[in-house]
């Protein structure tokens, strides 16, 4: 895609597999639209019709793009919605407010590398297994970074490796995550956490089952936002041996991890 502002909703349908969408430059190749929950007005599931870019086709690759929901702080408004398996997103800006990035599908694996993702409430959410490497997660309000809905029998959920958590200047009270569904799994490894991250780290969304059913964990966190003695008692600090299980091969699977390494070794 050539540099330019593309004001439209884009869908990659499920029958369009093995498709790549590569921009001329991340900053100047911009896909943007402004749908939001109230504007769609299709009932309780309106959120899921708001995406600027909807990916349903497996084996999709996006690079060097800005994907934006420009609706503003008006409620749920998805920028990128991924309903597909073996999806790679590299060097992209994913911009929005509430519900910026939706990742779904019980068995779907999705990979993000060197992306900038910003939002307010639950700005990374859903049930897919997703690995984020070397990404920046930027909070625009006092709220929650993630809201995973990992199915009970899925091993990983959301995994963040070597990521940086930052915030707007007026933001000072952000949770690492809360459980959209009670078996949510979210893990941060080798991440740098700004002072905006709350000492307790995690929120139970007023669900009494959560301390026994979720898996929220960290390994080798650093920065002012890492206060291990003040984290909620039901979260986990991984041992080095446990952290080794969070390899790209284990999280993404052997065939997809091989494809990822081939792409990023070029």
Image (tube, helix red, strand yellow):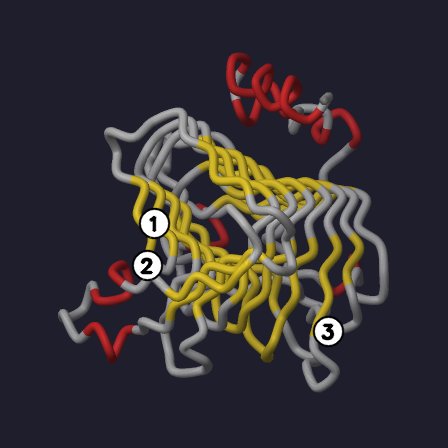
Separation (CA) of disc 3 from disc 2: 33 Å
Instruction: Tell me the mark number nearer the camera, choosing from 3 and 2.
Output: 2
Residue 54, label in figure: 1
Residue occupying the point 58% across, 37% down: 131
Q: Position of residue 158 (x, y in %)?
A: 53, 43
Image quadrant assignment for residue 63: top right
Separation (CA) of disc 2 from disc 1: 8 Å
The one of 41 and 208 positioned closer to us in this rendering: 41
Residue for badge 2: 9
Residue 196, label in figure: 3
Instruction: Tell me the mark number nearer the camera, choosing from 3 and 1.
Output: 1
Q: Is residue 216 above or below residue 88?
A: below
Image quadrant assignment for residue 173: bottom right
Drawn side of residue 93 relative to residue 208, left or right: right
Q: Is residue 74 above or below residue 64?
A: below
The one of 107 and 59 positioned closer to us in this rendering: 59
Q: Secondary structure at mark 3?
A: loop
Q: Position of residue 251 (x, y in %)?
A: 56, 27
Q: Disc 3, disc 1: CB below 8 Å?
A: no
The one of 97 and 208 positioned closer to us in this rendering: 97
Quadrant of image for the C terminus = top right
Callout 3 crowding tier (Cα within 10 Å): few <14, some 14–19, many ≥20: many
Callout 2 crowding tier (Cα within 10 Å): few <14, some 14–19, many ≥20: some
């Amino acid at each position: 895609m050539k540099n330019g502002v593309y004001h439209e909703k884009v869908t990659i349908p499920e029958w369009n597999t093995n498709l790549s969408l590569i921009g001329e430059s991340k900053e100047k190749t911009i896909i943007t639209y402004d749908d939001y929950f109230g504007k769609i007005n299709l009932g309780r599931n309106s959120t899921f019709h708001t995406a600027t870019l909807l990916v349903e086709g497996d084996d999709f690759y996006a690079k060097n793009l800005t994907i934006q929901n420009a609706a503003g702080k008006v409620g749920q408004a998805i920028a990128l919605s991924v309903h597909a398996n073996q999806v790679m997103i590299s060097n992209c800006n994913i911009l929005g407010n509430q519900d910026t990035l939706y990742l779904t599908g019980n068995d779907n694996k999705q990979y993000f590398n060197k992306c900038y993702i910003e939002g307010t409430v639950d700005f990374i959410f859903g049930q897919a297994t997703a690995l984020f490497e070397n990404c920046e997660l930027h909070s625009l309000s006092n709220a929650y970074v993630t809201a995973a809905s990992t199915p009970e029998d899925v091993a990983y959920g959301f995994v963040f490796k070597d990521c940086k958590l930052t915030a707007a200047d007026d933001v000072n009270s952000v949770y690492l995550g809360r459980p959209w569904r009670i078996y949510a799994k979210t893990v941060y490894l080798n991440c740098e956490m700004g002072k905006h991250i709350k000492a307790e780290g995690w929120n139970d969304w007023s669900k009494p089952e959560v301390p026994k059913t979720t898996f929220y964990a960290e390994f080798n966190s650093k920065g002012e936002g890492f206060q291990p003695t003040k984290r909620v008692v039901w979260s986990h600090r991984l041992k080095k041996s446990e952290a080794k299980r969070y390899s790209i091969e284990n999280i993404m699977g052997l065939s997809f991890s091989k494809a990822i390494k081939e792409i990023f070794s070029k």
